[in-house]
Amino acid sequence: MRRSLFGLAILLFGACACAEEAATKANLKQQVIATERAFARTMADRDQAAFVSFISVEAVFLSEDRPLRGKQEIASRWQQYFQTPDAPFSWEPETVEVLDSGALALSTGPVRNAKGKLIGTFTSIWRLEEPATWRIVFDKGNCVCDQP
């Protein structure tokens, strides 16, 4: 009888641990979705300082001509996108996945021009740098170019 109760307790503990782990992963995924949306909102709000706050110190943005390395270089290059009253483009997360460790996440989705036309996609890697604080460590945009 004791073995049966002990076995049942282990099963229940395992089930609870799995449910808790699934809830934690779902929570982390929602954090990344919210972070990506807030990051995109900085472009719409024309707030470069807020934009830069989402970038890790050692981030790498893969640009057309060469990788941009570090928060300062990225901020300097991206300043051009904050010069006009209207945002030149927007983006939103479509797919988000978080590692089982909860340390890194990937987000990807469409990029649209100011008129809403699909012009590309993005892929970003986010790192949990503090509790509930995700910062982007890698970013890559891909053109959806019109074919003749």
Image (cartoon, helix red, strand yellow):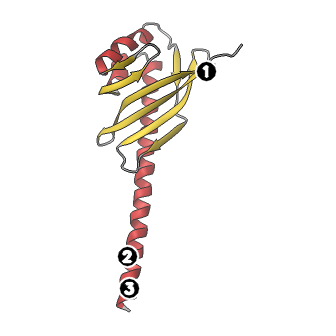
**Which label lies toward us, 2 or 1?**
1
Q: Earlier in the sequence, mark 1 or mark 3?
A: 3
Mark 3, other Cα within 10 Å: few <14 / some 14–19 / many ≥20 = few
Q: Is residue 117 left or right of residue 53?
A: right
Specify the amino acid type for callout 3: Leu
Q: CA distance from mark 1 to mark 3?
A: 60 Å
Residue occupying image coordinates x 35% and y 37%: 127
Residue occupying image coordinates x 37% and y 71%: 13
Quadrant of the drawing holding the C terminus: top right
Is 22 in front, or is 123? 123
Kindly identify which residue carries mark 2.
10
Kindly identify which residue carries mark 1.
144
The picture places residue 142, in percent across and down from the top left corner, at: 54, 23
Q: Is residue 124 left or right of residue 121?
A: left
Q: Residue furthest bottom?
A: 1
Specify the amino acid type for callout 1: Val
Helix, strand or loop for disc 3: helix
Mark 1, other Cα within 10 Å: few <14 / some 14–19 / many ≥20 = few
Query: Mark 2–mark 3 contact, CB under 8 Å?
Result: no
Kindly identify which residue carries mark 3.
5
The picture places residue 50, in percent across and down from the top left corner, at: 35, 22
Residue occupying image coordinates x 44% and y 36%: 34
Residue occupying image coordinates x 33% and y 20%: 69
Against 115, residue 34 (above or below) is: below
Query: Mark 2–mark 1 contact, CB under 8 Å?
Result: no
Q: CA distance from mark 2 to mark 1?
A: 52 Å
Quadrant of the drawing holding the N terminus: bottom left
Is 66 in front, or is 25? 66
Against 83, residue 120 (above or below) is: below
Helix, strand or loop for disc 1: loop
Q: Is residue 122 left or right of residue 39?
A: right
Specify the amino acid type for callout 2: Ile
